[in-house]
Image (cartoon, rainbow, N blue to C red):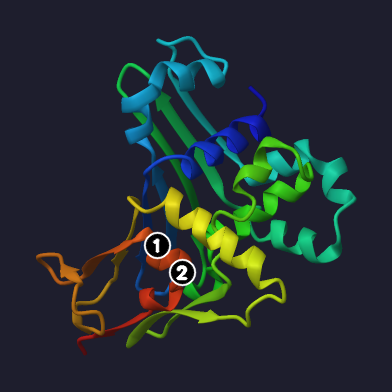
Amino acid sequence: MKLYKLLSFSFLLATLTSCTFTENIYVNDKGTGKFSLDMDGSALMEMAGDQVGSQMGASAKKDIDSTFTFKQLFEEKKDSIAKMSPELQKELKKLENFVVNTKMSTEKKQFLMVLSTDFKNVNELQDVLQAASTLQKLDGAGSQTSAFSSSFENNSTLSYTYDGKKFSRKAIIEKPKADGKTADSGADMSKMIFSSSNYIVKYHFPKKIKKVSNPNALFSDDRKSITIQYPFTDYMENPDKLNFDVEFEK
């Protein structure tokens, strides 16, 4: 199966069923680290695994375990990318170093997609789900990717900062689009699709945590990691609810 077809179908599954999205960040002493976004759609496999396997072009008992980079994907779609605006090409460029791993097993009732990358500075990170939604523009309207073209757009800009003393995750809400009806319609659709999905953040630091501004944060035994769970509708409708600061012990 071609890379783009596999990725497109995987994102499509993620928008059609209850999923758990887990955002992982591992920060090292010097501020470098690893980021990953895990999308677990195993609930769909429990309900309709055989049908999904058939749609993916796999037999009911054949597992899929595929790993590739966005750079490989963009090479496959280079002709389409060349026709895009410089702005959209710049958005895709941000994903170039991400590795995509997709695992699907109808027998094990498993569907998992992981987008991961290493970073030199936390400040480089962005909202991967929103950036990935740009992929639908490669084939234009009418393709299967258009089904998730706006599914992850929450009208915000996400940024991360870390200076060794404090870590911040901050989403800034942008001005509403002129076409309010379209935005409302999209929000209603997203709310219906993701009403039973969750968005979890798991952050791991090289220092012990003194305090977190979110009272729902759960600490690891060594107080170097936190886990916070949100309804996915918060990510979609009120992304600033996922804002928080972490302060570290001296």
User: For numbered disc 1, what is the local secondary structure?
Assistant: helix
Displayed quadrant of residue 207: bottom left
Q: Residue 136 appears at what percent x and percent y?
A: 70, 47
**Where is residue 90 drawn, in percent x and y?**
75, 63
- Is label 2 in contact with label 1 (beta carbons under 8 Å)? yes
Query: Which residue is label 1 attached to?
Result: 233
208 vs 30, nearest the viewer: 208
3D distance between C-alphas at marks 2 and 1 = 6 Å
Left or right: residue 166 versus residue 77 is left
Q: Looking at the picture, does residue 226 appear above or below residue 43?
A: below
Report whether 4 appears left or right of 137. Answer: left
Task: Give the residue type at disc 1.
Answer: Thr
Question: Where is residue 99 shown, x and y percent of the image?
Answer: 54, 45
Q: Which quadrant holds the C terminus?
A: bottom left
Checking the image for residue 237, the label placed there is: 2
Q: Residue at x 82, y 43 (%)?
A: 78
Q: Nearer the viewer, residue 37 or 27?
A: 37
Relative to 148, does residue 89 appear above or below in the rendering? below
Answer above or below: position of 8 versus 116: above
Please report the residue visible at 50 percent of the width from the left and 44 percent of the height from the top: 15
Residue drawn at 41 percent across, 45 percent down: 39
Local crowd size for mark 1, using a 10 Å CA cut-off: few (<14), some (14–19), many (≥20) = many
| Residue 141 shows up from this direction | yes
Q: Kindly identify which numbered label has been placed on residue 157.
A: none
Q: Is residue 63 left or right of residue 245?
A: right
